[in-house]
Image (tube, rainbow, N blue to C red):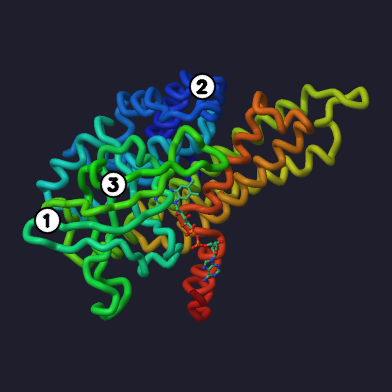
């Protein structure tokens, strides 16, 4: 057993750190206050060839594994870019996994290179307002008419829809009443984001202002049949295939966020003098930070283990979900402690840690909640009856 990163992985981390150093705290603070997609950052990662880290080489990518991508996403987040930086490239890095696995060679040829070189951005539209985590119940309908599908319905929380040229969309092609199981009858599409047929309303939210999340309304939105991925009615299974990698990557991002918060807290504790000594000399300050460090290290090992399982082609559901749960919690606790360590200054934007705390809630909520992960582990790892 070897816990060390290999030379290639060290080089990924170092190169990403170097790119990210061009986007300093002031850049991300401004983005957090004013919003606006971090287009320069997205371009810098694209130009260095890292958007296609997991896409096969024949389509312009690097053909590396999800473990390598996790190392990259942690480094982005840990640079201080946090979830604002990570979410700006997250979809390019993992989102087209269903196209890679289930797309035809023609679709791969057409769809993947523009995502790798950054000329196209895509959003991922699954969540609906009245369905929640019960994805099989989603209501957006795609009805086939000749060589096109006509889509009507609504999605919510769809990130990057303000800037995306493409959309990966899960919609129901066979009504629920006509299928054997609710997991059947959903289909997956990757197609142009036609703004004349999709109305987009940005949601005002707690953090990550730079990367928008939106309500989407589809009114007779047309999709050519050649933009359907795989077989009609099998979309849910295709989406499931991409869920474990997404959980591993978001877990890595949460670890990175916790790590940068922890570093800021420790640096501050060394120099802030109260009662004639650094606050970091008090165990009441040291112990919670030491606990945060251990929790983040443990979560990172879980991320690496889950990534390794996925890259080996092993079933990795429990590991990927555990990584996402543990990293989400460890990241959040580290960010909260970083604010508390700074006292009143922790609440000031110029110290950055309040921004990290706001962003640290995202990996706890999305793409799946803590409660549903606990239910999944209870069922799959402990053999308890399914509860949801
Ligand atoms: C910043 C952000 C970005 C996002 N980006 C995207 C995106 O790009 N694309 C996309 O498709 N979605 C996106 N999402 C949506 C996200 O994936 C969902 O918010 C998440 O899956 C939770 O779904 P919900 O909000 O409908 O919660 P609900 O399903 O309404 O759940 C609400 C609460 O009830 C709990 N709950 C529900 N059922 C049970 C049960 N049986 N047992 C125990 N507890 C239960 C949940 O755990 C949760 O705490 C984003 C969300 C956020 C906040």
| Number of numbered discs overlaid on the protein picture | 3
Describe the element under mark 1 as helix, strand or loop: strand
In the image, residue 74 sits, relative to residue 170, either above or below, namely: above
Vertical comparison of 362 with 351: above or below: below
Question: Which residue is depicted at the point 42% across and 28% down?
Answer: 38
Q: Residue at x 43, y 59 (%)?
A: 129
For discs 2 and 1, the disc positioned in front in the rendered view: 1
Crowd rating for badge 3 (residues with CA inside 10 Å; few <14, some 14–19, many 20+): many
N-term mark: 1 or 3:
1
Give the x, y percent position of residue 133.
Answer: 45, 63
Quote the CA–CA distance across marks 2 and 1.
44 Å
Q: Give the residue furthest to the right.
A: 275
User: How many C-alpha atoms fall within 10 Å of the one at disc 2: few (<14), some, or many (≥20)?
Assistant: some
Q: Residues within 10 Å of mark 1 (few under 14, many from 20)?
A: some
CA gap, disc 2 to disc 3? 31 Å
**Residue behind mark 3:** 198
Position of 276 with respect to 112 (left or right) is right
Which residue is labeled 1 in the image?
A: 148
Check whether the beta carbons of the residues at disc 2 and disc 1 lie within 8 A of each other.
Answer: no
């Amino acid at each position: 057993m070897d816990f060390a990163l290999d030379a290639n992985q060290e080089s990924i981390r170092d190169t990403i750190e170097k790119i990210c150093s061009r986007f300093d705290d002031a850049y991300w603070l401004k983005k957090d206050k004013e919003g606006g997609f971090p287009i320069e950052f997205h371009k810098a990662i694209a130009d260095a060839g890292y958007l296609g880290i997991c896409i096969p080489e024949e389509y312009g990518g690097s053909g590396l594994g999800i473990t390598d991508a996790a190392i990259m996403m942690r480094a982005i987040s840990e640079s201080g870019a946090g979830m604002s930086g990570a979410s700006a490239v997250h979809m390019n890095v993992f989102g087209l996994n269903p196209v890679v696995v289930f797309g035809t060679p023609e679709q791969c040829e057409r769809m993947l290179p523009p995502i790798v070189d950054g000329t196209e951005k895509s959003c991922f539209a699954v969540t609906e307002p009245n369905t929640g985590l019960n994805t099989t119940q989603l209501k957006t309908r795609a009805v086939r008419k000749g060589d096109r599908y006509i889509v009507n319905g609504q999605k919510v929380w769809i990130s990057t829809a303000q800037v995306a040229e493409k959309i990966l969309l899960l919609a129901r092609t066979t009504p629920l009443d006509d299928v054997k199981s609710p997991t059947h009858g959903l289909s997956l599409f990757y197609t142009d984001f036609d703004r004349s047929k999709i109305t987009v309303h940005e949601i005002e939210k707690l953090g990550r202002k730079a990367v928008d999340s939106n309500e989407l309304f589809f009114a007779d939105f047309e999709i050519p049949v050649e933009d359907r991925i795989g077989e009609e009615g099998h979309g849910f299974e295709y989406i499931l295939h991409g869920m474990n990698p997404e959980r591993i990557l978001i877990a890595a991002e949460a670890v990175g966020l916790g790590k940068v918060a922890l570093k800021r807290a420790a640096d501050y504790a060394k120099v802030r003098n109260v009662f004639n000594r650094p606050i970091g000399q008090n165990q009441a300050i040291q112990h919670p930070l030491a606990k945060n460090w251990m929790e983040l290290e443990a979560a990172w090992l879980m991320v690496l283990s889950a990534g390794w399982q996925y890259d080996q082609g092993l079933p990795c559901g429990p590991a990927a979900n555990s990584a996402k749960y543990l990293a989400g919690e460890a990241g959040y606790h580290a960010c909260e402690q970083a604010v508390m360590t700074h006292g009143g200054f922790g609440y000031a934007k110029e110290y950055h840690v309040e921004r990290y705390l706001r962003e640290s809630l995202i990996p706890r909520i999305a793409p799946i909640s803590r409660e549903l992960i606990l239910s999944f582990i209870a069922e799959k790892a402990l053999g308890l009856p399914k509860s949801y």
